[in-house]
């Protein structure tokens, strides 16, 4: 896995402060006496205005790193700082407020709406309702679920 800030080089924002710092982050999963190391000692900095591409093969820890940097998961060890504040030690409620007020997320498209193509193609409210399972109380749905 490679995390490469763009433009390449040391990430320093205004007054030399990075927007995002990851220092010595590790993530381990323990199952029945087996330890799986998802991340081992990740270090990176991203300055305001920089773009970051996290690339690597399947299973290399990309999603784990992104979840930890966004405060959706906690590292086993190490620190994550956003704007100089260590988020890896925030209590759950403060973490939720920080994510709500200060972060934006762009998830992989297909995870958001699994049947978007069908709903978009038909452009009908009833198709969207069937697709998402949403109900206004006036639609009727078959017990077998939406058709493909």
Image (cartoon, helix red, strand yellow):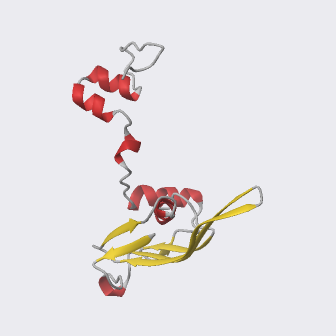
Position of residue 136 measured from the top left corner of the image (x, y, whole percent): 37, 21
Residue 111 vs residue 119: left or right? right
Pick the front one: 18 or 30: 30
> In the orientation shown, which residue stands out farthest toward the right?
33
Number of callouts: 0
- Please tell me which residue is depicted at 55% across the width and 59% down the height of the picture: 73
> In the orientation shown, which residue stands out farthest toward the front?
57
Pick the front one: 56 or 49: 56
Query: Can I make out residue 123 in this image?
Result: no
Position of residue 29 measured from the top left corner of the image (x, y, whole percent): 65, 60
Whether residue 69 is situated above or below residue 48 in the rendered picture: above
Position of residue 6 measured from the top left corner of the image (x, y, whole percent): 29, 75
Tell me the quarter of the picture where residue 112 sits: top left
Whether residue 131 is situated above or below residue 8 in the rendered picture: above
Tell me the quarter of the picture where residue 82 sits: bottom left
- Please tell me which residue is depicted at 38% across the width and 80% down the height of the picture: 18
Query: Can I make out residue 44 in this image?
Result: yes
Pick the front one: 60 or 115: 60
Pick the front one: 72 or 26: 26
Q: Quarter of the image for the C terminus: give it.
A: top left
Residue 7 vs residue 103: left or right? left
Position of residue 32 measured from the top left corner of the image (x, y, whole percent): 76, 55
Tell me the quarter of the picture where residue 119 sits: top left
- Please tell me which residue is depicted at 45% across the width and 58% down the height of the picture: 99
């Amino acid at each position: 896995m490679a995390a490469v800030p763009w433009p390449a080089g040391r990430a320093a924002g205004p007054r030399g402060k990075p927007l995002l710092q990851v220092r010595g982050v590790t993530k381990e999963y323990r199952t029945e006496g087996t330890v799986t190391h998802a991340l081992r000692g990740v270090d990176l900095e991203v300055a305001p205005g920089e773009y970051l591409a996290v690339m690597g093969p399947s299973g290399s820890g990309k999603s784990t790193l992104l979840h930890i940097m966004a405060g959706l998961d906690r590292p086993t060890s190490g620190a994550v700082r956003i704007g100089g504040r260590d988020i890896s030690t925030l209590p759950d409620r403060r973490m939720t407020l920080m994510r709500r007020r200060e972060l934006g997320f762009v998830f992989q498209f297909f995870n958001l709406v699994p049947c978007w193509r069908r709903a978009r193609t038909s452009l009908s409210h009833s198709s969207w309702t069937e697709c998402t399972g949403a109900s206004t109380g006036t639609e009727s749905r078959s017990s077998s679920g939406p058709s493909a």
